[in-house]
Image: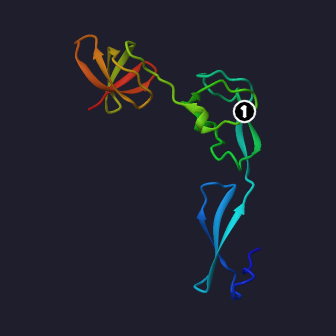
Amino acid sequence: MVSAPENEPKCDKPPEVVVVDARYPSRMKLELRCGQAWAEPVVARVKLRAEVLVAAQDIDAGAALDEQKLRREARDLSATPEAIGALDATEGFVPRRRLREGTLLQARLLHEPVLVRRGQAVRIVARHGGAIAVESAGESLGNGKRGDTLRVRNRASGRVIEARVLGPDEVEPVQ
């Protein structure tokens, strides 16, 4: 229920609540407004509880995340707004460090793994439309995560090209 502050004139309709700063869900800054008559700043302390993902077992750094290693649990998120609630949000990411059983999964604890390393053999896959694909062997001249652009030497021609990392050991030429 919202009512006018004690020292302000009465409002002939319910005051409007405007969110001023919601960066921290546990301490939101609001403003109560009665048209042009008055405005009063207010701080709302909020307890936010939601189903989120936690480690169902100890998970090593760099290990793939899947349904068997994670479980859903209701947690207070007031102090941890980075919590991850959906399994598909972890796709392509691995833990930066070892996660102990019961650890709340947060974005800052995950990172994209390096899929291609310098000196590693890679498949260069050039596609045209959905029907034509040409593959060639190459050697990575740098490290890269999914979507990164790096230099690759075509082993057949010796030519160095710019290529985008698609997955483990697979790149596509950048046009």
Q: Residues within 10 Å of mark 1 (few under 14, many from 20)?
A: some
Find residue 94 and report its horizontal and vertical position in percent.
58, 27
Q: Is residue 147 above or below residue 160?
A: below
Q: Which residue is mark 1?
A: 103
Quadrant position of residue 111: top right
Q: Nearer the viewer, residue 139 or 40?
A: 40
Quadrant position of residue 7: bottom right
Secondary element type, mark 1: loop
Q: Farthest top residue?
A: 156
- Residue at 76% x, 44% y is 75
- Residue at 68% x, 58% y is 27
Left-right relation of 65 to 116: right
Find residue 80 and report its horizontal and vertical position in percent.
67, 45
Specify the quadrant that holds the C terminus: top left
Left-right relation of 132 to 24: left
Quadrant position of residue 55: top right
Q: Farthest front residue?
A: 7
Left-right relation of 150 to 112: left
Name the residue type under label 1. Answer: Thr
Q: Nearer the viewer, residue 162 or 38?
A: 38
Colour mapping used in the image:
rainbow
Left-right relation of 22 to 117: right
Find residue 129 and report its horizontal and vertical position in percent.
32, 33
Specify the quadrant that holds the N terminus: bottom right
Q: How many marks?
A: 1
